[in-house]
Amino acid sequence: MPAFQPDVIVTDLRMPGMDGMALFRQVHEQYPTLPIIILTAHGNIPDAVAATQEGVFSFLTKPFDSQKLLAEIEMAIQVGNANETDESTSTKNAWRKDIIGCSPQLENLLLEARRVAPSDVSVLIQSPSGTGKELLARAVHDISHRADKPFVAINCAAIPESLFESELFGHSKGAFTGADKDRVGMIEEANGGTLFLDEIGDMPLDVQGKMLRFLQEKQIRPVGANTQVPVDVRVISATHHNLENSIQSNEFREDLFYRLNVITLELPPLAERREDISLLASHFLRQIHERDSNCVARSFSPQAMALLTMAKWPGNIRQLMNVVEQVAVLSTTPLIPESLVLRALKGESNRIESFAEAQGRFERDYLIKTLQMTAGNVTHAAKQAGRNRTEFYKLLHRHKIDPKHYRIAAKAAAR
């Protein structure tokens, strides 16, 4: 079920169960840039001041003037969508065309990315390997004002330590043995655009110091050169490491971490966005069929797709792509059978789960089902499950399930 993100929320202050400020705080925790307007018949100036200090967009006292409310809503939408244009939906979404999925987790992440993109602040993408960090970095670049300038990606884990400085900053002729001509480094190649530093946690410590200086001064000195070169780039970095642990072990500079980590975007692992697995698998299969005329596979059998959906995917999207390529090549029928998927997964989906694994999977699926049936109403869901609200909330927290997603999705489906 697709998620729906409103442009603005208008709520009353006094309501049964939860008042408007409590609602604001819960929404604001998950969606800090979503404008919220509060209406009240009980308001006074201290209430309004306190509310706006917390981040409420507007605080109107009843009876309110309808034109005033409409003006506030229009202003809130303009603020929330300051960078949107009147382009068609397909054109507006072109920046995210390579990112496949509709899960609430992904939609919320892309909303954050869209709001971050127009600025030049540094962004750190934190997520496990194989989740699509470079695709997200490219998407941020493509919707920024730098979109018509270069996007230069560097895999820090793939560059030999002895060549790192030269690759990043360039070198002058004669700087070292074999430097028979001047060479522009990758930072300078990205001038005017975006520099993507993948696996930043693998950058050598001595190069980290030079990178910090570049971020502070916006200038580089190629190896062997006597002059500084001004460079204007937006830096997006990514890692699957916990950089805070690397700081503690003196493997990563704390000052560089704070320079890179102005905004953090977290791509969820594939196992936490199972709604997207069928979309991704079908997308990869279409791509294979388009480039390989010998591929007879057109779709997955229901049993095969069920196996894909329930697999663990420790390798995330990269592993899913590998499995789809394997079964597409081996399939002799348009409908890919369950047996090929089992073989590609090396029996992972066929093994007997431990009791704890089975219980955890059942709990998560059960919680999601009850929230879908009750449109995200935790009180009703807990009642159906025969549990009190406190216990039900603890279960949701344990499985990292946010009921807000299901309330938003239910409203979107009702439209």
Image: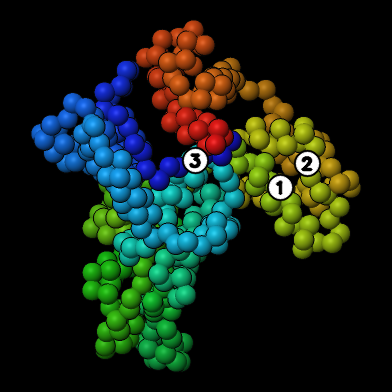
Question: Residue 282 has which mark?
Answer: 1
Residue depicted at 26% across the width and 55% down the height: 258
Residue depicted at 55% across the width and 60% down the height: 88
Callout 2: helix, strand or loop? Answer: strand
From what the image shows, is residue 11 above or below residue 222? above
Crowding at dot 3, Cα within 10 Å, few <14 / some 14-19 / many 20+, comes out as: some
**Quick one: label 3 or label 1, which is nearer the N terminus?**
3
Residue depicted at 53% across the width and 49% down the height: 131
Residues under labels 1 and 2: Cα distance?
8 Å
Q: Is residue 297 left or right of residue 120?
A: right
- Pick the front one: 357 or 159: 357
Q: Say if mark 1 contacts mark 2, CB within 8 Å.
A: yes
The image shows residue 320 at horizontal and vertical percentages of 65, 46
From what the image shows, is residue 16 above or below residue 136? above
Q: Is residue 153 visible?
A: yes
Residue depicted at 43% across the width and 49% down the height: 111
Question: Most extreme residue toward the top, as rendered?
Answer: 386
Report which residue position mark 3 lands on.
4
Residues under labels 2 and 3: Cα distance?
28 Å
Query: Quadrant of the image for the C terminus?
Result: top right
The image shows residue 56 at horizontal and vertical percentages of 24, 40
